[in-house]
């Protein structure tokens, strides 16, 4: 590793700070979720030692393994990956946040399986802001109805919206996609559902997302380096 995780984390914090100020938003109004998927528990520990407390995972088995190994560290776990209905139980038990709720059935299972001793699980509705260019997330025209139903579930606290735009080099396109999510939050507020979170922006586009109103950015490779999946030749 040419650069330590602590140094990379500081660089990302600087980028977030600069983008926040340039957007005329208050310092500290954008939270960093460090996406540790595919990286070992030791990498999470290193980031934790550098002050990071919120971590994102995409795969249920990885969340289970790291949450178990790092149980004493008081980590705030964000589940951000696609969620199948047969895997909701561990997420309901281990996560503090789920960013990827895109249908009612998943929300109902998470609510039912959330242990009564824990506070309600914070959830975001993932919206497909890229039309046919993307598969995950509900359609923008489904958000209001889904939000109403999710908000009524006792085991969940609906907090906001999340999106992953299709990859693009074009800032105008990305800003438009992020703008769709921000607009949907306003729409929900007008319908009486005031939500405080917009989860958008990753390593390559976090400054743009902050300009468009992100309250949470999910950053992986800029902190931990390039990912190697187990099927990849390493
Ligand atoms: C992997 C992932 C990220 C982080 O992506 P980077 O480009 O590595 O910052 C953020 N959000 C989701 C949903 C992801 O799957």
Image (spheres, grey):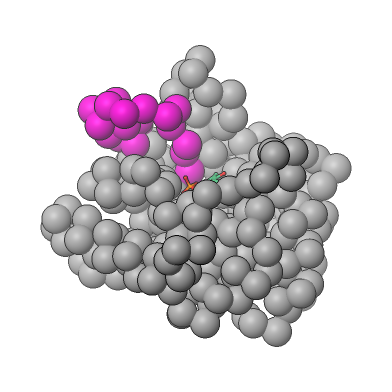
Q: Which residues are magenta?
A: 162-180
When asked about the image quadrant of residue 46, the answer is bottom right
State whether residue 8 appears in this view: yes
Where does residue 202 sit, x and y in percent of width and height?
42, 47
Instruction: Say whether residue 152 is left or right of residue 130.
Output: right
In percent of the image, x 66 and y 34: which residue is there?
103
Q: Nearer the viewer, residue 11 or 201?
A: 11
Where does residue 61 sit, x and y in percent of width and height?
79, 54
**Which residue is the extreme one toward the right?**
86
Does the magenta run of residues contain 167?
A: yes
Where does residue 60 sit, x and y in percent of width and height?
76, 52
Quadrant assignment for the C terminus: top right
Q: Nearer the viewer, residue 183 or 26?
A: 26
Does 179 appear above or below 10? Answer: above
Instruction: Say whether residue 177 is left or right of residue 20.
Output: right
Instruction: Say whether residue 42 is left or right of residue 139.
Output: right
Instruction: Say whether residue 178 is left or right of residue 91.
Output: left
When asked about the image quadrant of residue 179, the answer is top left
In percent of the image, x 44 and y 74: which residue is there?
6
Where does residue 230 sit, x and y in percent of width and height?
74, 45
In percent of the image, x 50 and y 34: which residue is there?
127
Q: Nearer the viewer, residue 57 or 87?
A: 57
Does 4 appear above or below 108? Answer: below
């Amino acid at each position: 590793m040419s650069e330590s995780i602590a140094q990379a984390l500081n660089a990302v914090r600087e980028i977030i700070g600069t983008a926040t100020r340039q957007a005329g938003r208050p310092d500290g109004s954008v939270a960093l979720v460090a996406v540790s998927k595919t990286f070992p528990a030791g990498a999470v520990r290193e980031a934790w030692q550098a002050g990071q407390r919120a971590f994102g995972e995409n795969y249920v088995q990885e969340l289970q393994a790291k949450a178990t190994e790092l149980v004493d560290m008081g980590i705030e776990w964000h589940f951000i990956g696609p969620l199948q209905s047969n895997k909701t139980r561990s997420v309901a038990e281990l996560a503090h946040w789920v960013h990827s709720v895109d249908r009612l059935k998943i929300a109902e299972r998470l609510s039912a399986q959330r242990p009564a001793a824990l506070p309600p699980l914070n959830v975001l509705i993932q919206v497909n802001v890229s039309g046919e260019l993307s598969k995950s997330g509900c359609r923008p025209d489904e958000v209001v109805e889904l939000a109403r139903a999710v908000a009524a579930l006792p085991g969940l606290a609906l907090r906001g919206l999340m999106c992953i735009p299709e990859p693009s080099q074009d800032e105008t396109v990305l800003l438009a996609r992020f703008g769709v999510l921000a607009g949907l939050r306003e729409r929900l507020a007008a319908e009486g559902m005031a939500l405080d979170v917009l989860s958008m922006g990753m390593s390559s586009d976090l400054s743009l997302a902050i300009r468009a109103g992100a309250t949470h950015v999910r950053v992986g490779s800029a902190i931990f380096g390039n990912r190697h999946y187990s099927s990849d030749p390493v």
